[in-house]
Amino acid sequence: MNKKLIAVPALLIAIGGGTVLAQTDLLGSAEGKPAITASEAKKLAFAEVKGDLAGFEFDVNDATPHYEMEFLTETEKVEVEVDAETGKVKVTERESRVNSQTSASASVAAQDVKISEQQAIDIALAEAPGTVTDVELDEDDGKYVYEIDIENGRTEYEFEIDANSGAVLKFEQDLDDE
């Protein structure tokens, strides 16, 4: 009888401890580096959608960490998600593009820059290692800049990099209070 009284609480502690360890492992992997890199995710998405990459973001706020991308084709805007753990590609939205000026300005932007998106990312990562969560090519006052966000643990970095010279125009570092 005494053995049963000792065994039951020990079993409950073991089960509870296992649950805590399992949850810790899940949380740890969600906050750690994703299995699929940003570069790999882009390659997978480009295999699915033929067009110009207009937006890129890493999202860990949902249940599954994933990359969100927006592509512009001649006829539509396509939003794609790539699972950061499995690499599974899913088209989440297709929208017809009626305004041809948007397409023209996107292709002009691609032709008017000397620094590739990957080169801009490399410049930012040299200053602040971590996971790239957002990349956008934007025009500010007639000048093209890459806006890049990087996360490293609880630290968030924001960059603006000149798309022609590669110069870092803006650098901000913030601590995530969540």
Image (cartoon, grey):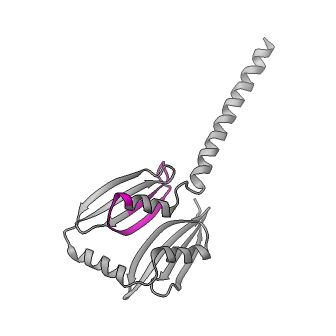
Q: Which residue lies furthest to the right in this view?
A: 2
Q: In this view, does 173 lie above or below 11?
A: below
Question: Residue 136: image x %, image y %?
Answer: 42, 73
Q: Quadrant of the C terminus?
A: bottom right
Indicate whether residue 154 is drawn in magenta.
Answer: no
Residue shown at the point (25%, 61%) measured from the top left: 95
Image side of residue 32 versus residue 165, left or right = right
Q: Residue at x 26, y 74 (%)?
A: 103
Look at the image and tell me in which quarter the N terminus lies: top right
Q: Is residue 147 above or below residue 23?
A: below
In the rendered structure, the answer to whether residue 149 lies left or right of residue 15 reads left
The x and y percentages for residue 125 are 58, 73
Q: Picture coordinates of residue 42 (x, y %)?
A: 44, 62
- Residue name at image x 21 percent, y 74 percent: 100
Q: What stretch is highlighted in magenta?
A: 47-69
Query: Relative to 86, is 81 on the left or the right?
Result: left
Considering depth in this image, is 18 or 56 the residue closer to the camera? Answer: 56
Q: In this view, does 51 lie to the left or right of 61?
A: left
Determine the residue positioned at 65% across, 39% down.
20
Q: Where is residue 7 in the image (x, y as percent from the top left)?
A: 75, 20
Front residue of 48/25: it is 48
Residue found at the far left of this picture: 98
Residue sticking out furthest to the front: 47
Q: Is residue 50 magenta?
A: yes
> Number of marks in the image?
0
